[in-house]
Image (cartoon, rainbow, N blue to C red):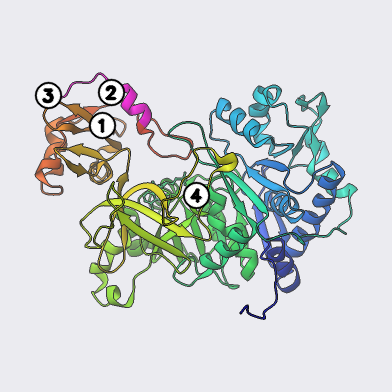
Amino acid sequence: MLGLMQNWPLTVDKILDHANRWYSGREVVSRSVEGPIVRTNYADIHNRAKRLSNALLGMGIKTGDRVATLAWNTGRHIEAWYGIMGIGAVCHTLNPRLFPEQLVYIINHAEDRIIFTDLTFLPVLEGIIDQCPTVEHIVVLTDESELKNVTLRCKGKPCLAMESLIDQHHAEVVWGGFDENTAAGLCYTSGTTGNPKGVLYSHRSNYLHTLVGLQTDVLGLSARDVILPVVPMFHANAWGIAFAAPAVGSKLVMPGSKMDGQSIFELLETEGVTFSAAVPTVWQMLLQHLQSTNSKLTTLKRVVIGGSACPEAIIRAFGDDYGVDVTHAWGMTETSPLGTISRPTADVEALGPDEVIPFKLKQGRAPVGIELKLTNDEGRELPHDGTTFGRLKIRGATIASAYFKQEGGNILDEEGFFDTGDVSTIDQYGFMQITDRAKDVIKSGGEWISSIEIENIAAGHPKSALAAVIGIAHPKWDERPLLLVKLREGQTSTKEEYLAYLEGKIAKWWTPDDVVFVDDIPLGATGKIDKKILRQQFESYRLPTA
Ligand code: AMP
């Protein structure tokens, strides 16, 4: 027997409709790419997004067509998102940190018809647009006056100004009305192996992800919050904040292109931000700014940190020095992205404030809507004892079932779980902790060594700017760890100093066989250490123990 409830398709246009109806005057503040702070609200954003939908329809965009954005976090970028998704077109977020040839690959693979972009990225497009035959128009998120000196052409046509398109169209347009499983967004994974692969979100998955994210123990946003998403809309959907904030009527503060400590600090204080989200490097820059200027944070209450492991120093500095609660989260492009989040349970909180810190350092627990399992290479489930590590697998309505155009074939196991490629433990309280990427884990004498755990400790040495650990072939042990350190400017150090620093902090047999000081450690497009390049660089390196 079927239930007798309304079939109300879960499409994301309804989120902005809701914000327009019930939080119309709630502000959206942006540091514009042109410079000034721009103030708008959900009613204006809704109206302008609808006008943009009409402009897109006028350009022949139909359901399922891909329309790309290459843009910073601003109110205009939100308008583009909803304008595209509202009519059933697919919003393809391009990551400007990709190499030009990767951008060309994904634009062509996605067959993008229009690219919305900021002034900042015109030089990038200038270099690649001739190699992207499917692109018919470039729309710049600005007004006509800024385009006077722009020479970029797309199929011989000048760039269009988003403001002119909005001015030329009215806001009468039907949003939604299609199946909730219709594709809404497309985001390519950073592609550390093979070509980048597209994750194709549906309206339903984005809507459900919004509800998952709004749980108190996940992002827990409210109508009283003022939210600054530093995490970019072009990487893993700004962790869903461009949906979650309008859904509950939070004020939004968009940082534009400026993510340095001073710029973020200014926005936090002038706009009264209560909640923010970013990767650890952004917080490191902010904390350095606060320390060097002896500044205080007067309104910020909570930050979510994810994308890579959150160092203890950040949790302690925020908590002890600035009274800001840190929540560590884990996720990936394939998981929309929220996967796990580290909020203490009643049992963990009862252990006492100092005992909670090790749990905050873990990547956390699965919220309702997400299923996790831990298996060995053969797919057998492993115990949740906090020490056994294995492959982390995930299942749920917000998790990819396949890549766009079926690249890579079947990506699910026989129970429908997606293998995250991360290696982790799960403890008896249900807290998951990433110990490595499956391809980075060092296999020594049949046992696994976590490269991340060693590099996190080494990175905590006061002389370190960055640290990385990779496995190097070893005739007896198969692989042994090599520690690479980029020192802070003006510092000198020795192998012995670093090995002494690690002593007692890791198992003795995890001790790196060598330490090499390097001028630079390569970072990928999403700011993570690129171990593929490091492994290439050290391909012929021989360990002294070999
Ligand atoms: P991406 O799809 O580019 O967002 O990358 C996802 C990957 O980033 C995950 O599979 C993890 O390897 C890594 N990652 C994300 N969040 C964390 C975290 N909190 N701690 C450690 N690694 C993380």
Mark nearer the N terminus (1 vs 2): 1
Task: Tell which circle, 3 or 1, labels the residue nearer the N-terminal end.
Answer: 1
Question: How far separated are the C-alphas under marks 1 and 2?
Answer: 10 Å
| Residue 305 badge | none
Res. 25 visible in picture: no
Given the current orientation, which residue lies at the most extreme top position? 540
Residue located 46% across and 66% down the image: 218
> Could you tell me the amino acid type at mark 1?
Leu
Q: Is mark 4 within 8 Å of ligand 1?
A: yes
Q: Are marks 1 and 2 in contact (CB under 8 Å)?
A: yes
Tell me whether the residue at label 2 lies in contact with that at label 4, contact meaning CB atoms closer than 8 angstroms: no
In front: 411, or 459?
411
Q: In terms of secondary structure, where does tag 3 sit?
A: loop
Magenta residues: mostly which secondary structure? loop
Q: Which residue is mark 4?
A: 334
Sequence-first disc among 4 and 3: 4
What secondary structure is marked by label 4?
A: helix
Q: Nearer the viewer, mark 3 or mark 1?
A: 3
Q: Was residue 125 drawn as part of the magenta stretch in this picture?
A: no
Is the Cβ of the residue at disc 4 closer than 8 Å to that at disc 3? no
Q: Secondary structure at mark 1?
A: strand
Label 2 sits on residue: 538
Using the image, determine if residue 81 lies above or below residue 483: below
Find out whether residue 534 is within the magenta segment.
yes
